[in-house]
Image: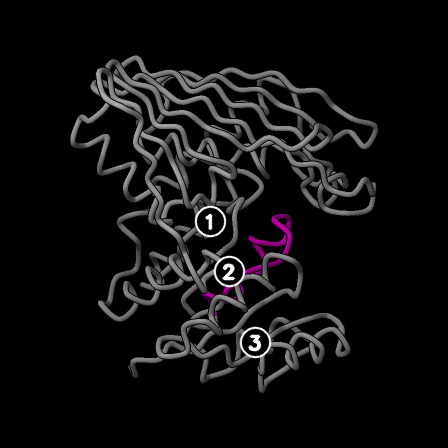
Amino acid sequence: MSDQIKWGILGTGKIATRFAEALNNIPEHAELLAVGSRNQDTADAFGDKFNISRRYTEYEQVAADPDIDIIYIGTPGVYHLRDVTMSLNQGKHVLCEKAFSINAKQAQIMVDLAREKNLFLMEAMWTRFFPIHVRIRELLKEGVIGKTNGITINFLAKPAYDLKNRFFDLNLGAGVLLDTASYGVSWASSLFGEPEAVTGLASFGESGADYQTSLVLRYSQGQLVCLMSSQISYDDKDAIVFGSKGKIVVHSPWYKPVKMTLHVEGKDPELISLPIDGYNGYEYEAMEVMGCIKEGKTESDIMPLDETLSIMKTLDTVREQWGHKFPFEE
């Protein structure tokens, strides 16, 4: 395999656009070779914007392209099972946008197939790869704030109100639990492992989706994570990791941060800046994926598949507590 990994992208939406920008920022490592869209005009516009030579109007054509090494799945979560399995069955490595799937049952099918095919698969939880979050893991391992007791996480972001878009349409897997709340659940998992207990409440809107949710998770060493997500409330994206001897305040937006303030008992607060000049942030997860593929690995140590399955089971547990199912679920 050459030093340059060749990518295909399924979908041309907002996140796919940002990921394409990121790949174009690291041309020494990545070539964005193909895009798949259900519409030729959309495929051409996306291709023109990012200098993509191959523009397909069928996702299957991207998966079948023999020159592509890996496919980025940027379609809505309700289609991830279809698109991931199709790509794996064509022998392609896959990076699948979060939420990885609609439920743990679907996630297990995807993971089992990747392992059967001996192909790389990872959930695209870009937050984990930001320099600030790498540094937080180091600080906690070093015990800088003493015993880590938990996190408070806010992710309030208000999209345009449109009952037909993926944020509100149940048929597209709408709701904040699988969208913004999944970031916080995943972050807590990366620090504390699988929760031993989880509970939550939701406010449901007119579409039947959870427009707001608040979760509390408890972990094996007594850590508590309090998480609030909303798609109908004014913007708030702050987070605090708190310990017995200090705290880390991650400045907004915590899920793609460039600054944090370290507070340690008896010391002056320390502002830590780790800028990502020239990047939009997706480059870090792309570099992780490409590094794994070059090393012959089928999973990332930072975002392993068993952890993705655990996260999906946690989200399933919350929905079971609510008695909430999507129209297409059995």
**View extreme (left): residue:** 142
As displayed, is residue 325 above or below residue 214?
Answer: below
The reply, left or right, for residue 140 in relation to residue 95 is left
- State how far apart marks 3 and 2 are (Cα): 13 Å
Q: Quick one: 259 or 177, which is closer to the camera? A: 259
Q: Nearer the viewer, mark 1 or mark 3?
A: 3
Residue ID at (51%, 15%) = 199
Instruction: Report the amino acid beneath label 3.
Output: Val
- Which residue does the numbered mark 2 point to in the structure image? 85
Q: If you read the primary sequence from the N terminus, does the residue marked by circle 3 or circle 2 appear first?
A: 3
What range is drawn magenta here?
Answer: 72-89
Residue ID at (69%, 33%) = 231
Res 232 → quadrant: top right
Task: Name the spot of residue 268 as percent of width and height, x first.
Answer: 27, 24
The answer, for residue 184, to whether it is visible in the render is yes
- State how far apart marks 1 and 2 are (Cα): 8 Å
Instruction: Report the amino acid beneath label 2.
Output: Thr
Q: Quick one: 158 or 58, which is closer to the camera? A: 158
Tell me whether circle 1 and circle 2 mark residues in contact (CB < 8 Å): yes
Circle 3 — which element? Answer: helix
The numbered dot on residue 109 is 1
The numbered dot on residue 62 is 3
Residue ID at (66%, 66%) = 12
